[in-house]
Amino acid sequence: MPSLLRSVSLSSSLLLLASACVIEEHDEEGEDGPLVAEVSSEQCNAGLRWVGGDEESTRMHPGGDCIGCHASRGEGPRYLVAGTVFEMLDEPDDCFGLEGVTVEITDAEGRTWSLPTNDAGNFFLAAQDGPVAMPYRAAVVAEGVRAEMATPQSTGSCATCHTATGAQGAPGRIIAP
């Protein structure tokens, strides 16, 4: 019995250590403080929210219009396609989305890009990796299940339609199948 208790204690210690590492990963600090905060699942489904303002990061402003913001401010990388994949259609801006989902873009000339989501749920196709011939088709792939958009798209700024309330006929956020 003592070896079983020692084993459970060691496993608990390793689990605690692993948990501390994961929390620390989200505790990234910017010039003015933390960039990510833990919040209730009622506030953000994933329990994490971007609080870093406009601090430069690939995790910034999940659900926001990356392309429009970068263009209007003349800052940050230039993207051809960018957005966030969430679990829920009505997730608020700045809430973290789903990591490990793939967004597939196939342009009018048949070129395909597989864009993985990061830990904030953000995905992007950098300008230097293009061009993208319009219109393009988009699909979301998660755990071997694929969901395709019904119509080809002519803008790479996914968040202009995929808002928490949906715009221009979109049902809401981009969600995993």
Image (cartoon, rainbow, N blue to C red):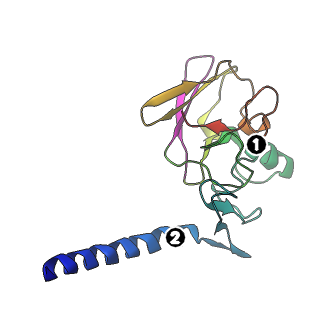
Front residue (pair 32, 43) = 43
- Circle 2: element type: helix
- Circle 1: element type: loop
Q: Residue placed at 43% from the left, 37% from the top? A: 143
* Label 1 crowd bin: few (<14), some (14–19), many (20+), radius 10 Å: some
Front residue (pair 82, 64) = 64
Q: Vertical placement of 137 versus 74: above or below? A: above
Q: CA distance from mark 1 to mark 2?
A: 27 Å
Place of residue 113 in the rendered image (x, y in percent of width and height, measured from the top left): 54, 31
Q: Residue placed at 78% from the left, 49% from the top? A: 70
* Label 2 crowd bin: few (<14), some (14–19), many (20+), radius 10 Å: few
Residue marked by disc 1: 164
* Residue 31 visible in the picture: no
Res 154 → quadrant: top right
Q: Nearer the viewer, mark 1 or mark 2?
A: 1
Q: Residue placed at 67% from the left, 40% from the top? A: 82
* Residue 162 visible in the picture: yes
Front residue (pair 100, 46) = 46
Q: Residue placed at 68% from the left, 19% from the top? A: 152
Residue marked by disc 2: 23
Q: Is residue 161 left or right of residue 147?
A: right
Place of residue 125 in the rendered image (x, y in percent of width and height, measured from the top left): 62, 39
Q: How many marks?
A: 2
Q: Vertical placement of 32 versus 118: above or below? A: below
Task: Point out the stretch of residues depicted in magenta.
Answer: 101-118
Q: Vertical placement of 109 versus 74: above or below? A: above
